[in-house]
Image (tube, rainbow, N blue to C red):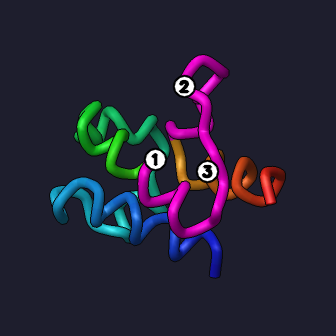
Amino acid sequence: MLKERLAQLVSEACDGEITAAEALSATVPLSYLGVTSLAQMRLIDALEREYDIEIDLADDVTFLDSVDGLAAWVSAAR
C-alpha cells in the first residue's frame, strides 16, 4: 500500500506526466521518465506533509530516484 501511495504522489507531483503505474514499474531513475527538479520539489513537499517527515536536501537524496527508494526511506524515517 505504501508503494502505491508513493507512486501516486510521484504522478501528482508531475501533473500526471508520469502515471503511478509507470513510477511503480520503472527500472530507471524517475528523472529518466521525466521527473523534473520542480516535480521533485513538489514530491518532497507532499512527502513531508503526508508523512510528517523532513527531508534535508543537504543529505543524500538518491532515494528520490525510485518508488522503492522512497518506500525504504519513508519507512525508516517514521
Residue 57 circle label: 2
Observer-side mark, 2 or 3, equals 2
Q: CA distance from mark 2 to mark 1?
A: 10 Å
Up the image or down, 60 lies above or below 44; here it is above
Quick one: 53 or 71, which is closer to the camera? 53
State the residue position of label 1: 44
Marks 1 and 2: in contact by CB < 8 Å?
yes
For marks 2 and 1 on the same chain, the one whose residue lies earlier in the sequence: 1
**Given the image, on which type of amino acid does mark 1 rest?**
Ile
x, y (%) of residue 59? 66, 21
Q: Which mark is residue 67?
A: none
Q: Left of 66 or right of it: where is 10?
A: left
Residue at the location (28% across, 41% down)? 35
Q: Farthest residue toward the bottom?
A: 1
Determine contact: label 2, label 3, CB under 8 Å.
Answer: no
Q: Residue 66: where, in percent of width, then height?
A: 53, 45
Q: Residue at x 40, y 65 (%)?
A: 9
Label 3 packing within 10 angstroms: few (<14), some (14-19), many (20+): many
The amino acid sitting under disc 3 is: Leu
Amino acid at the residue labelled 2: Leu
